[in-house]
Every structure is written in structure tokens, then in C-alpha cells.
Amino acid sequence: MRCVDGGSRRGSLRAAVAGQAGDRGRTQEPALAGGRRSVTRWVAALCALGLVAGSPLVAQSERLVAPQIVAAIASGAPGPVAGAADGDVTIVEFLDYNCPYCKKSAPELQKLLRTDQRVRILYKEWPIFGEVSEYAARSALAANWQGKFLAAHEALIGAPAELDNRSQVDSLLKSIGVNLVRLDADRREHASEIDAILARDAAEAQVLGLKGTPGFLVGRQLVHSALTLPQLQQLTSSARSSQQSPVKAAALSRRNKAVAQQRKLF
């Protein structure tokens, strides 16, 4: 249940990784910089952990990501964080603000945050739907210099219709108190940081083998579709169980299969 299957979007993904080079938490400013060189080093580091072209990262039967890769993606660099800063389970979402399934999952993630105080969500901006999507992603990241990334994210992902032009993005952000003059200045002044974050997110999506949005990492579990609250809760519970006792890995695999069956009905 992916918004896109790769195909014509892969060229833009490769361009993002090769030619583009983003933000942390609620009010902290992004610290990642260095552009293309930083992204090259990051991809090389992932490869050093065992991710080489042609090597499957995720076992198709279990759909589990190697723990060292999860750790690198979830905590290796600054990123937009919602929920508990020191949560015991991290959910990483690769998203596009014009992806309907990302929009469908957004309220379910908010319900999870309200019902589970130990969850941490890391948003990865992966604008694969074109120029307006990229403008929205850059604007959300730039809003972090005003301490408004999460508010911007929620406004953009909660838009009831597709974002067709930049003025729609600006209007939504203005409505939640983002200063558009400062936003424009921050987009330009911090362009290299934003480039680096977008390129890193795209590189990570490529390494994970994602071909569309949304893509979720819940603990070690990789999911390529929209999720309901019960599915998120089940995946989160499985992630906690596997952390507490490695002996429960087999049970985690069985629960993943049950979640996959549920997704067919979503």
C-alpha cells in the first residue's frame, strides 16, 4: 500500500542522494552540515556496517533490519523528534507531505503518542512527489529555526487536500504562526544544512530499499505501508519485547506476520 512504486521517481531519488545534500526536536536548531561530502561519508558508514549494493538488508520472511543499521538511522544524526526524547522505542517515518497514505497514518501516530508516553518518533523528510513536496519539506525544516518544526509538520501532513503550489504551503504555515519572512531567510541562510538532511534521508531510504512512502521503522521492523493505531501498538509492543529479551525474536516474527495480514484490510 505504497504511494509510489519507485519507477519514474528513482531518478529524482538518485539526484537527491548525489546532488542535494533535514532538524532536531522541538526547538533545537539542526546541527548537520557539510552537504554532499557529509552524505557520502554517511552512506560509506552504512556500507561499512554491511550494507553493500545487492545485499538484502531486510529478510523478506521477517522484515527485520540489522540492529546496528537501526541504531545508525535512529540516532546517528540530528533529526525532527516527536514524543519522548528518551523513548524506549523509536519509530522512524519516511514521508512526503503529498502522500495520501502518509496523511492517513498521521492521525494514527498522534493517537499513539497520546496513549504511549514512551514512544519517540523521528520524521525523515523524503519529498519524492515533485517540486511542491520538496518546497514543503524544506519549509518544515526551516521552520525549526523558529522552534516550529513539529507544528509545521502537523499542519502540512494534516492538509486535507494535495499541496498544489507554494502559496498553499505558505498559507498553512502562516496560519500556525510561522513568520514567512524569517522562514524565507532561514531557507536561504541554512540551505546547506537543509540540503544535507534531505540527502541523508534519501540515502537512508535507498539503503533500506524503500520504493515509496510511507516507510516505517518500528524498532527493527520495516513496514512499507500506512498503519492503524492497533497495528502501531502491536509493532511497538513487539519492539519492546525484542529489546527486553532476545529469546522473543521468533514471537516477534509471528506478530509481524499478523500485522501484515491486518494491513491487507486497511
Image (spheres, grey):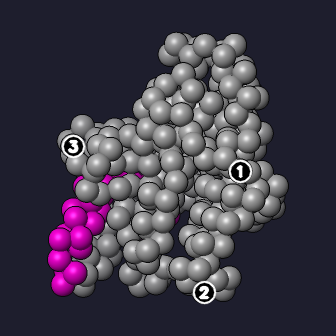
Residue at left offset 59%, top offset 32%: 140
Residue 58 among those drawn in magenta: no
Give the residue number, with chain letter if any, for mark 2.
55
Instruction: Judge left or right: residue 164 versus residue 89.
Output: right
Give the residue number, with chain letter if any, for mark 1.
34
Residue at left offset 61%, top offset 55%: 201
Do labels 1 and 3 touch, CB within 8 Å? no
Residue at left offset 29%, top offset 63%: 235
Residue 241 among those drawn in magenta: yes
Residue at left offset 17%, top offset 71%: 244
> As rendered, which of 16 and 63 lies closer to the eye?
16
Question: Which of the image's four quarters has the C terminus?
Answer: bottom left
Q: Label 1 vs label 3: CA separation?
A: 34 Å
Give the residue number, with chain letter if any, for mark 3.
117
Q: Label 3 vs label 2: CA separation?
A: 36 Å
Given the image, on which type of amino acid does mark 1 rest? Gly
Which quadrant would residue 174 be assigned to in this image? top right
Point out residue 56 in the picture as x, y percentages from the top left corner: 56, 84
Given the image, on which type of amino acid does mark 2 rest? Ser
> As rendered, which of 156 and 70 lies closer to the eye?
70
Instruction: Judge left or right: residue 217 versus residue 188.
Output: left
> As rendered, which of 240 and 254 lies closer to the eye?
240
Given the image, on which type of amino acid does mark 3 rest? Gln
- How packed is label 2: few (under 14 Cα within 10 Å), some, or many (20 or more)? few
Vertically, is 57 above or below 237? below
Q: Label 2 vs label 1: CA separation?
A: 28 Å
Q: Which sits earlier in the primary sequence, circle 1 or circle 3?
A: 1
| Residue 88 seen by the camera | yes
